[in-house]
Amino acid sequence: SQQGEEDPQALSIQEGENATMNCSYKTSINNLQWYRQNSGRGLVHLILIRSNEREKHSGRLRVTLDTSKKSSSLLITASRAADTASYFCGKIQGAQKLVFGQGTRLTINP
Amino acid sequence: NAGVMQNPRHLVRRRGQEARLRCSPMKGHSHVYWYRQLPEEGLKFMVYLQKENIIDESGMPKERFSAEFPKEGPSILRIQQVVRGDSAAYFCASSPQGPEETQYFGPGTRLLVL
């Protein structure tokens, strides 16, 4: 089964609201990475959080990691229309490959 | 510093033909990864290469698919005798170190098999 399953599968909010996406995984990790994909484009790296970190910030993005629950969350504050995209978490499996879940499709309504 | 380049961006092939997808990693990156994405799905790992070597090809079908990353030139993903089920977006990523560090993705090649 896939590592890095995102939840919810789809999320629709109003511009200005905060968006929270979650990611769960099954086996221990060294780090977890969040990516964004705009429709028809490649993935853009957002944040990498290591297993010894609990929280990381980048602009309006905040990522948390709870290794005891094997979960991570991505919070986007003060959402904008340009944040509309799919968001994926990636986790290394077998030390050789980055495995993604199905992603969360985020829609920001004006 | 140019990002990861992929070409062609769109490729149309008839069943039975060959598809060649090219990926030029970012300058200084010796690790290359290929992923496949079907509509409304996440990316699925196919293969990981490091200059002239295949490190992990566990996600690549055993038949018809091959990948290389020669000493000089781009990485090539080759699909022989394409079938309709090969229609997908194929993404390449590169990194300066191994897969646990940030991977930088190209814009993808959209393959359509008629």
Image (cartoon, coloured by chain):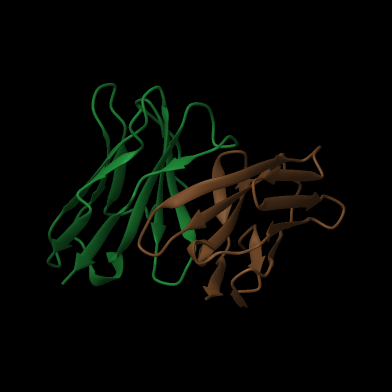
- Residue B59 as seen in the image, left or right of residue A70: left
In percent of width and height, residue B21 lies at 24, 47
In-image side of B78 versus B55 (left or right): left
Report the front residue among A44 and B82. Answer: A44
The answer to whether residue B60 is left or right of residue B82 is right
Q: Can residue B70 be seen in this view?
A: yes
> In the image, residue B79 lies at what x, y percent?
24, 53
Q: Where is residue A66 in the image (x, y as percent from the top left)?
A: 83, 52
Residue ID at (34%, 54%): B90
Q: How many numbered tags mark residues here?
A: 0
Residue at horizontal 19%, vertical 68%? Answer: B113
* Residue B7 placement (x, y as % from top left): 22, 46
Please report the residue visible at 40 percent of the width from the left and 65 percent of the height from the top. A39
Q: Name the tint of chain B in the rendering.
A: green
Q: Which of A82 and A98 is in front in this view?
A: A82
Query: Residue pushed farthest right?
Result: A68
Relative to A27, residue B87 above or below: below
Quarter that holds the N terminus of chain A: bottom right
Please name whichever residue, B72 or B29, is drawn nearer the observer in this view of the structure.
B29
Image quadrant assignment for residue B80: bottom left
Please tell me the colour of chain A: brown
Say which quarter of the image contains residue A9: bottom right
**Residue B59 visible in the current orientation:** no
